[in-house]
Image: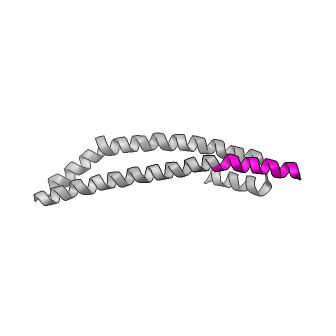
């Protein structure tokens, strides 16, 4: 939220420093997001996720319910990974747009 406020202020006041600060903060955010996302995905598949699947399977009485539990957890894991990747790709696109915006601001300021 603070990142977007910095970019908004930089855009309104046409200050390159704010937009560059936004780009730097975005790099840190992406690194932190990838690190925490990787840890979350690891725990989802190895620690916590296995316990949840086992609890669901043990509480079920029939084989079809146990299979349904496993499929539900497998699907939720896939959806989680896809969502993480989509958000990371969006952030990477912002890395492409932000320097272009700084260059555009430089050209506008030179023309003024």
Residue 81 vertical placement versus 46 (above, below): below
How far across and down, in percent of the image, does residue 9 sit? 73, 55
- Taking the spot 63% from the left edge, 43% from the top edge, the residue there is 25
How far across and down, in percent of the image, does residue 14 sit? 79, 53
Q: Is residue 7 magenta?
A: no
- Taking the spot 24% from the left edge, 46% from the top edge, the residue there is 51
Examine the residues drawn in magenta and state their main secondary structure.
helix
Q: Quadrant of the N terminus?
A: bottom right
- Taking the spot 75% from the left edge, 44% from the top edge, the residue there is 17
Residue 63 vertical placement versus 47 (above, below): below
Picture quadrant where residue 68 is located = bottom left
What count of labels does the image hold? Answer: 0
Front residue of 51/21: it is: 21
Part of the protein shown in magenta: 97-112
* Image side of residue 17 versus residue 111, left or right: left
How far across and down, in percent of the image, does residue 108 sit? 82, 52
Front residue of 41/93: it is: 93
* Image side of residue 79 versus residue 28, left or right: left
Picture quadrant where residue 36 is located = top left
- Taking the spot 74% from the left edge, 55% from the top edge, the residue there is 11
Q: Is residue 103 magenta?
A: yes
How far across and down, in percent of the image, does residue 112 sit? 89, 53
* Image side of residue 76 versus residue 14, left or right: left
């Amino acid at each position: 939220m603070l990142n977007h406020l910095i970019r908004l202020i930089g855009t309104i006041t046409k200050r390159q420093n704010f937009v560059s600060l936004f780009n730097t903060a975005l790099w840190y955010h992406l690194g932190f997001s990838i690190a925490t996302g990787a840890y979350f995905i690891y725990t989802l598949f190895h620690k916590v996720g296995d316990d949840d699947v086992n609890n669901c399977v043990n509480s079920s009485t029939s084989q079809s319910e146990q299979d349904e539990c496993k499929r539900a957890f497998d699907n939720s894991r896939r959806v989680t990974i896809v969502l993480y990747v989509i958000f990371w790709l969006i952030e990477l696109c912002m890395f492409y747009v932000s320097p272009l915006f700084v260059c555009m601001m430089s050209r506008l300021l030179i023309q003024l």
